Amino acid sequence: MSKAKVLLAEDDKTMVSLLKTLLKMEGFDVVALQADADVLAVVRREKPDVILLDVHLSQQNGLDILDSLRNSQDTTDVRVVMSSGSSVENECIRRGANAFLLKPYMPNDLIAILKQNIRSA
């Protein structure tokens, strides 16, 4: 069986490095986006099992990206886990996120939510 692919849309380079290490140790295939990447194009190319999407990216708004994913026929079913240091869980879920993680979160919580969303896909 192939590894589940996680797409990281996070602009904090330290966080990306830590997440890549953690997720690879847990057996995931990890693709990290550049801060100003065209997320929709990368999702179409990489076909991830789940996206870990920060709400507040330096060049982009994660909620706008979520809206684009949900409004495009070929990406509407992609599993999206949103994360933020702000309490915006209700807004994320209302706009179509499959789950939300409040930063800072524990690694075990992240892994559990990713695995749950991959099984649900």
Image: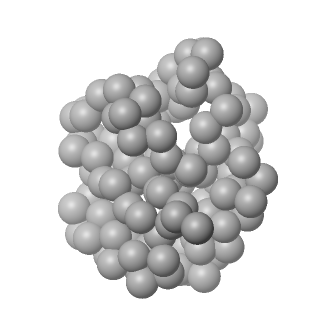
**Residue lying furthest front:** 1
Q: Give coordinates of residue 84: x percent, y percent.
A: 50, 53
* Residue 86 at least partly seen: no
At a point 38% along the width and 61% down the height, the residue shown is 30
Q: Give coordinates of residue 87: x percent, y percent.
A: 62, 51
Query: Between 91 and 76, which is closer to the camera in this rendering?
Result: 76
Q: Quadrant of residue 32?
A: bottom left
How are the colours assigned in the image? one colour
Q: Give coordinates of residue 118: x percent, y percent.
A: 67, 57
Query: How many labels were placed on the picture?
Result: 0
The quarter of the image holding the N terminus is bottom right
At a point 52% along the width and 64% down the height, the residue shown is 2
Q: Is residue 44 above or below residue 118?
A: above
Query: Between 100 and 98, which is closer to the camera in this rendering?
Result: 98
Q: Is residue 86 above or below residue 95?
A: below
* Residue 110 at least partly seen: yes
Q: Quadrant of residue 15?
A: bottom left
At a point 39% along the width and 53% down the height, the residue shown is 8
Q: Is residue 95 left or right of residue 45?
A: right
